[in-house]
Image (cartoon, grey):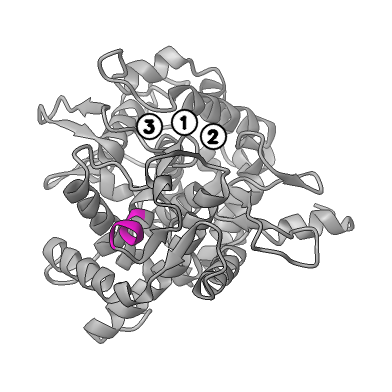
Amino acid sequence: MSVANPETSAALSLLNAKAVRERAHRMLAIGLEDKLPNFRIHLDRMDGAVDLVLETTRKAYPSLDIPFHSRWRHFVAGNDNRWADIAGQTRWPDPAARARAEFDLAIVSVFLDAGAGPSWRYHDPKTGLAIGRSEGLGLASLAMFESGAFSANPLQPLRVDANVLATLSVADLERGLQVSDSNPLVGLEGRVDLLRRLGALVALKPDIFGSLDTPRPGGLFDRLAMLADKRQLPAPAILSELLQQLGPIWPSRLTLGGIALGDCWRHPALTTKDATSGLMPLHKLSQWLAYSLIEPLQTAGIRVSDIDGLTGLAEYRNGGLFVDGGVLAFRDADDARREHEVASSLVVEWRALTVALLDRVAEGVRQRLGLDATSLPLAKVLEGGTWAAGRRLARERRPDASPPVKVTSDGTVF
């Protein structure tokens, strides 16, 4: 890709985790000077947030043997690791075949993993339980994948084919996710549109997604394996590749120099002297996906380094931890009752502050435990951790466990 155009070069500078972290911490610094339009920051409440995260972590993982925060955790119901069972019973021709299938599953499942809303439930046929939110979406997407819902070959159900995704219908997803008038899912059409865009893009890039197979999202494994140096790949490189290869599928938002910026938004506080002035990259779903591709790469024998090069996730459970925990306070108390668009400066500010504050929580948790970032990377603090603590506070404070900031979602961000 040519970067002769300065705007194109500026756009590419936002498509990485380093840009997310740098700008998030700049937002925090502005907030600590009490110069943000929407939130005040009370760092004296951070010890309480760290205490809650540590307590939540110890309860879930008493031995502190914490896995990475990733989509794979949602394929476990009770002690039943459903994907591990499926993969263990499958005769894979080689490790790369399994990795492609795992990439297929992770990519589609993450793209379906925006907020489900308070009412939707997946009625799990294996346990009879009604499971909501991310866990329900995870099990539902796994069941669709296992049944061959995304495969063009009935004899090979465990795959996602570009042409199947490109023609996916709302009815297909309604059926797989058990959506009905009595079981509504927020942003259903947005999810279908996103998967169709994914299918169309993958079909148009056989050099990236079809180098050793017909075009499929899982073909990205072969691309990353090729980029690995001596079977080692930095985690931020996974994210950069996801953003550059899949960027065009996101709904039309901001573009710069002909580059789609994805989960990147305007905020008046972030002024710079170049074309990126006022822009705050967050890349939440792409980072969630990057975290979720680490384990398939490791299983295939590729070592993933610099996992802390990725950032915390700017989503409503992590963000809710800080609002419900009193670290962040609305300047205008009425904002707690209003609905806010994803692109609003309030939501952008909240999400950016969440990323920066998650780094501070991670430091606090490590200090309490006497561990360093190598033994307790951010990915484990998130899993232990911040996301569950945010959900716990939401359940304690609101009957429907909704987040403390009301966001109008289209099913492609939260």
Q: Is residue 47 above or below residue 237?
A: below
Residue annotated with mark 3: 158
Q: Amino acid at mark 2?
A: Arg
Residue 215 lies left or right of residue 96; in this view the side is right
Magenta region, residue range: 320-325
Q: Main secondary structure of the magenta part?
A: helix
Residue on which disc 2 sits: 216
Residue located 47% across and 68% down the image? 356
Is residue 28 shown in magenta?
A: no
**Residue sitting at 58 percent across and 71 percent down?**
26
Q: CA distance from mark 2 to mark 3?
A: 12 Å
Secondary structure category for the residue under label 3: loop
Q: Nearer the viewer, residue 344 or 80?
A: 344
Label 3–label 1 contact, CB within 8 A:
no
Is residue 322 found inside the magenta-colored segment of the image? yes
Q: Give 169 or 305, whichever is nearer the viewer.
A: 169
* Rendered location of residue 210, percent (x, y): 61, 38
Could you tell me if residue 170 is visible in this image? Answer: yes
| Disc 2 and disc 3 in contact, CB within 8 angstroms | no
Residue type at numbered disc 1:
Val
Q: Which mark is residue 266?
A: none
The residue where tag 1 is placed is 160
Which quarter of the figure has residue 368?
A: bottom left
Q: Quick check: marks 2 and 1 in contact, CB under 8 Å?
A: yes
Residue type at mark 3 is: Leu
